[in-house]
Amino acid sequence: MHITGNGSASDTVTEFVLLGFPGCQELQRFLFSLFFGVYVFTMMGNGTIVCAVRWDQRLHTPMYILLGNFAFLETCYITSTVPSMLIDFLSETKTISFVGCFLQLYFFTSLGTTEAYFLCIMAYDRYLAICRPLHYPTIMTQRLCSILMSLCWVFGFLSYSVSTVQLSQLPFCGPNTIDHFLCDMDPLMALSCAPAPVTETVFYVLSSLIIILTLLYILSSYTVLLITVLKVPSAAGRQKAFSTCGSHLTVVCLFFGALLAMYVSPTADNPAEIQKIMTLFYSVVTPFLNPLIYSLRNKEMKAALKKVLRIQ
């Protein structure tokens, strides 16, 4: 354990140890190969979607612009966790600096929050397109789309800025071992030498409000949308609407399901391994599946991806 001084209560932690997924060297190498492959596929898949949206003029519509930006967000989100995991798999010390730990916490929570906001405006876009098709071109202009996306990024990175700074100001005098593969609020709060009920309460209230309110908005949007779709007389029209929205709902279920289990339901009694798996689900699995979900269920996107990949 690396702390300054001689181990008294006044000493402060200068780095943390991330236990990650303990195991023998062979297991560490296997996990490195597995997550390296997942990371490369995620970056290539989402990067291809970004290129397809940028280069194909047919995809210069709000729905695909949102999807392209969402794919870019996914590459940022998985980059906030997996590269440090890969280093830890091959490292004997598995340490992360104090500043690095809190930077990871900030970017991880901020990008996750931005993703929740993005899923909201994607639901709003689909609601307008299906429930108010005649007004859609005049309401969801590229200017409004750009404003909404900018707001997602700004508020996503503002949401946890104060909580992260408050947590970093708490005294950490040892131990410095985190039984997780990343720096998250729960394990860091547990390592603090002094209780901080206000900081902890603010974080969990904020997390619960963000997760529950964004999920309620998305579900209410899709409830109205579903009612509208069921009234469409054409079977082909209903199928197209379900196909477009099914991809989005799949991502919503994967992302919010794990978030609810992790941050809203009580997880204090859950084993550390369960918390790691739940965190993996929304931070790694969702970005990994995003290209497959959106490309396999969308003809326009499949055509654009083939064009980008030069597959005739």
Image (cartoon, rainbow, N blue to C red):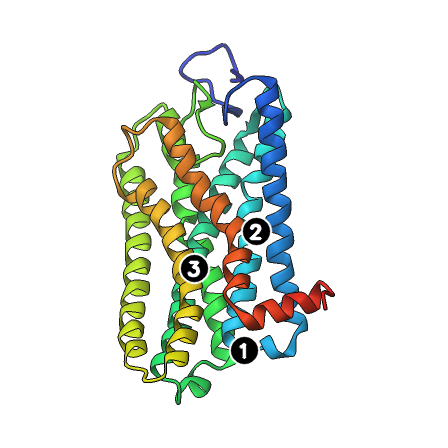
Q: What number of labels is visible?
A: 3
Residue hosting label 2? 76
Location of the C terminus by quadrant is: bottom right
Query: x%, y% of residue 106?
Result: 48, 44
Say which of 182 and 157 sits in front.
182
In this rendering, the label closer to the viewer, 3 or 1: 1
Residue hosting label 3? 155
Q: Amino acid at mark 2?
A: Cys
Helix, strand or loop under label 2: helix
Residue at point 33% right, 59% down? Answer: 214
Query: x%, y% of residue 61?
Result: 54, 78
Q: Earlier in the sequence, mark 1 or mark 2?
A: 1
Q: Quadrant of residue 203?
A: top left
Which label was assigned to residue 61? Answer: 1
Say which of 7 and 224 sits in front.
224
Q: Amino acid at mark 3?
A: Phe
In this rendering, the label closer to the viewer, 2 or 3: 2
Q: Amino acid at mark 1?
A: Thr
